[in-house]
Amino acid sequence: MTILSHRLQLVRPSETKAMTARAAALKTSGVNVIVLSQGEPDFPTPAPIRDAGVRAIGEGRTRYTAVAGVAQLREAICGKLNRDYGLSYNIDQVTVGCGAKQVIFNALYASLDAGDEAIIPAPCWVSYPDMVALAGGTAVLAPCTPESGFKLSADTLAAAITERTKWLMLNSPCNPTGAVYSADDLAALAQVLREHPQVHILSDDIYEKLVYDVPFVSILSVAPDLVERVLIVNGVSKASAMTGWRVGYAAGPAHLIKAMNTIQGQTSSHTSSISQYAAIEAIGGDQNHVAGFVAEFRQRRDLAVGLLARAPGLSCLLPEGAFYAFPSCAGLIGKRTPQGKVIGNDVDFTDYLLDQFGVAAVPGSAFLAPSFLRISYASSQTDLDLACKRIIYACEALT
Ligand SMILES: Cc1ncc(COP(=O)(O)O)c(C=O)c1O
């Protein structure tokens, strides 16, 4: 007899979190491990934002807030969307939750019935398929290859849509590939979407600010006519180094936002009041810190991708955004380690990296892309340099 639900069998624990926990355990036992598995900037939260949080405590802003988030924060979000996207939302079209993660879950839970489908371009963020399953829907994977820059093509999208499709999950810049959709890419997708009014678009823009060679473009900039079908999701975790504060938000049609608030009102109520006041500063205040983050990430990207190019058997596109490199390790499958073990797949390779070389990376299969691995370059240049050199030795040692 088990107390666990059938529903639980639909979800896997997050593999990025599992790999990071494994690496942390090894570190605690004294092994020299470099952790490149975590999707988290290593910068401290900028001082003005931290101060806003401290001020909120001092001023006693420590009580329950509105479920959708404090009005001042939602106003700051409306201001940001107007400033950066040129869009006009009112605060009833905005909800704030415990990270973009919870906001996405609320949206899926509020909208999916059994048999409803969500199209997920793959490789994809680890949590999308599991959240869709938890919400009772069906994840439909739409494959994207390095040849297309890991971007969803209009033809692949058209082939994946059925009458039961409720969502297209768009994530640009993409975790794990770093792909950034251009205005042309999005216009081609919008053309297909116009023919299928049952499909809504969840635009996960959490890495919006982290672009290096090309601009971020929102689907609503190229297809404003889709506004009633787009849910913009964003948050402060990545661009303001606030992962632990847990603030994410969504903007979209008022009836969907209201439904998401109903789910939130019966589960977490809202994210921490203190975090919300800090987020007002992160979203509405000075944005100077962002340029510094981007410049540093660009250097790290160039360092990591430059070194990985020297690893025999790996091949890696230059990611245009986010803070991940996503090399293929297909060229290593079938090779043998010095310990005599055959590398049968991406999991064997990342295990070999961790166990023999003390480098924690996440296997591509976690992102529904076997034969790849994800390397986060949100670590110091010293750590990245050493880790990538260890990866080169690891590849050279295979026969
Ligand atoms: C693509 C993507 N969406 C959403 C999130 C969730 O971010 P948070 O819940 O910290 O706002 C992440 C975090 O790694 C992500 O990579």
Image: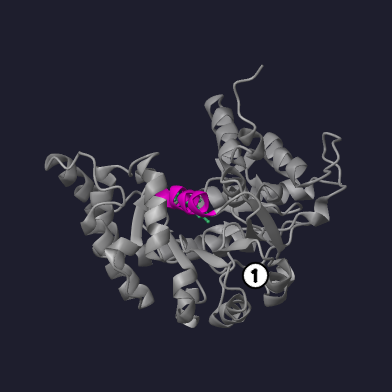
Is 54 left, or right, of 287 in this rendering? left
SS for callout 1: loop
Q: Is residue 102 above or below residue 227?
A: above
Nearer to me, 199 or 173: 199
- Residue 35: in magenta span: no
How many labels, in total? Answer: 1
Residue linked to disc 1: 151
Residue 249 visible: no
Residue at x 19%, y 43% (from the top left corner): 54
Is 78 left, or right, of 367 in this rendering? left
Residue at x 56%, y 24% (from the top left corner): 29
Residue at x 53%, y 47% (from the top left corner): 383
Q: Is residue 132 above or below residue 305?
A: above
Q: Is residue 28 above or below residue 10?
A: above
Q: Position of residue 202 (x, y in %)?
A: 51, 63
Nearer to me, 13 or 308: 13
Corner quadrant of residue 234: bottom left
Q: Position of residue 25 (x, y in %)?
A: 56, 28
Is 56 left, or right, of 258 in this rendering? left
- Residue 106: in magenta span: yes
Q: Main secondary structure of the magenta part?
A: helix
Range of magenta residues: 98-111
**Mark 1 is on which residue type?**
Lys
